[in-house]
Amino acid sequence: MLEPSGPIIRRPGPSRPRNFPDAEMGAWFLSPSAELPVQPSSRRNPETHLTRNGWRRICSPAFEEKTSVSLQGGIVNIGLGCIFSMVISTDSEINAGGVSALRAFALLGAGVSGFLSFTTLASADEAEHGLECPSYPWPHKGILSSYDHGSIRRGYQVYQQVCASCHSMSLISFRDLVGVAYTEEEAKAMAAEIEVADGPNDEGEMFTRPGKLSDRFPQPYANEAAARFANGGAYPPDLSLITKARHNGQNYVFSLLTGYRDPPAGVAIREGLHYNPYFPGGAIAMPKMLNDGAIEYEDGTPATESQMGKDIVTFLSWAAEPEMEERKLMGFKWIFVLSLALLQAAYYRRLRWSVLKSRKLVLDVVN
């Protein structure tokens, strides 16, 4: 029998909660005028536990088979009920462990499914838009960096000997090369090597003449239909603004020119096309054009594949932005001038205007 210990507190008898059955929660008793002992905080009786609404749960640690115990104003059922409660608690813990395991497996399955879905989407995006291009440290990408003019000259040589047979540059004239990669005499000599259709003459007929500095680079084909017919239906794009017309233009062009390889297992490329993972779809009509030693540079630079790729990309970058160096220089000049103006404004604000702003005027209204 459990005896109360400690000071006694009288409470009004609460009603028994319906959701606390004896079979599930163990042993409970109801005292209409229950005198509940207040256990000290440092020493709590392990056999008794206060619950809500004035009910007390009493469970013997030894799980003895007792049928009933009399207490003041109530009967407490312990023993078998408490053992049954412990069995249910154990089953609940097992069920809880099973639910936790199922949740863990569900989360793991969701993670694996998401990863596979992401991989599938990445593969589909790669097949549609091409492999993501690496980023290369181009020397002219800095804030105050300029073009490598020797590379521009070599890049024009690569264009003339490798690219000009299929690709046009309709927005570039020979005079644009003067002072950038060639002297005026050299540019005139290169322009004179081509024949330009001009006219009409005094007799109303068209004629051909040697090229001049004001002439544009020659077109490889008369029109788009002729270009498609000569290239199996593919149309070689104009290269004047190619580094601006493509996403991540410089890196894309370099990766495309140097990224040819054999198709992987399971990838079929039809006849007349070539596998390049950086090209959207992976199949491109242009064959690999840059090979080691394909040309001979005038300055003796070894004509490796990567060197030719760098030079032609530098040349195309200059063709798309010939004003870049002037723009950067003008921007630096404006920043310098505005910095001087800012310093002057700060000086007058701190040492001149602050004196006038903080002065105190005293008016003698009497005299």
Image (cartoon, rainbow, N blue to C red):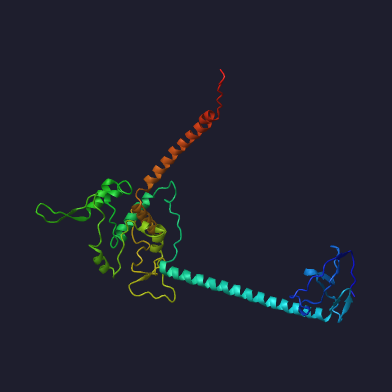
- Left/right of residue 315 with respect to residue 132 in the rendered view: left
x and y percentages locating residue 272 in the rendered image = 32, 72
- The residue sitting at 26% across, 65% down in the picture is 227
x and y percentages locating residue 169 in the rendered image = 29, 57
x and y percentages locating residue 308 in the rendered image = 37, 58
Q: Residue furthest left?
A: 203
**Residue 307's quadrant in the figure?**
bottom left
- 41 or 202: nearer the eye? 41
* Residue 196 can be seen in this image: yes
- The residue sitting at 25% across, 57% down in the picture is 218
Indicate whether 276 appears above or below 334. below
Indicate whether 166 appears above or below 327. below
- Left/right of residue 117 with respect to residue 157 in the rendered view: right
* Residue 304 can be seen in this image: no
- 203 or 64: nearer the eye? 64
Quarter occupied by the N terminus: bottom right
- Left/right of residue 106 with respect to residue 343 in the rendered view: right
- 37 or 135: nearer the eye? 37
Q: Total label count? A: 0
x and y percentages locating residue 241 in the rendered image = 34, 56
- Left/right of residue 11 with respect to residue 119 in the rendered view: right
**Residue 249's quadrant in the figure?**
bottom left
Q: Residue furthest top?
A: 367
Quarter occupied by the C terminus: top right
- 47 or 337: nearer the eye? 47
Indicate whether 163 appears above or below 176. below
